[in-house]
Image (cartoon, rainbow, N blue to C red):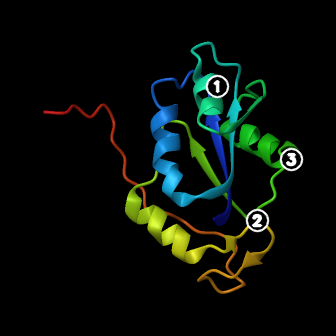
Amino acid sequence: MTDLSVVILAKNEKLHIKRCLEKLAPLEARQIFVVDCFSTDGNDKIAADMGAVTVFNKWPGLYAKQFNWALDNLPIKSSWILRLDADEYLYPDAIEEVKTLLPKWDGEKVTAGGLPPDVTSLSLSLARAFFAVAK
């Protein structure tokens, strides 16, 4: 298991939350939290049914404030945190790279990953699709 907690920000993401969580499964994150802004579409139930811990917080007006609320209030136990929006997901090659680089957690102890100890953050390659139409 990767010593990683995932924080997913969501509101009314029924269309996307399942895909986001399914794509994360191979990452074997230690914890997955969905910070929900009181969805009305069942998004929170889907996340909970898929094993994520759903917590609720009123939208503070800015994405960064919501994420910072999560950092300050969630019982995060891992040494690494991945932040996603519910309509984002990782490609399999990114997941494999993260699994190689980050420490592992076996339920009792953390073992070193492939990063030097002075590395404290990673930037992943980004691909964007906006109103993509399948043909």
Residue 8: x %, y % from top left: 63, 41
Query: Mark 3 or mark 2: which is in front?
Result: 2
State the separation of the CA atoms marked 3 and 1: 21 Å
Disc nearer the start of the sequence (3/2): 3
Residue 98: x %, y % from top left: 53, 68
State the separation of the CA atoms marked 1 and 2: 27 Å
The residue shown at (30%, 31%) is 131
Q: Which residue is mark 2?
A: 107
Residue 121: x %, y % from top left: 65, 69
Q: Nearer the viewer, residue 114 or 1?
A: 1
Q: Which residue is mark 1?
A: 44
Quadrant the C terminus occupies: top left
Q: Is residue 88 visible?
A: no
**What type is the residue that disc 1 sits on?**
Asp
The residue shown at (22%, 31%) is 133
The image's mark for residue 72 is 3
Q: Is residue 94 visible?
A: yes
Q: Residue furthest front?
A: 107
Disc nearer the start of the sequence (3/1): 1
Residue 32: x %, y % from top left: 67, 46
Q: Is residue 51 above or below residue 38?
A: below
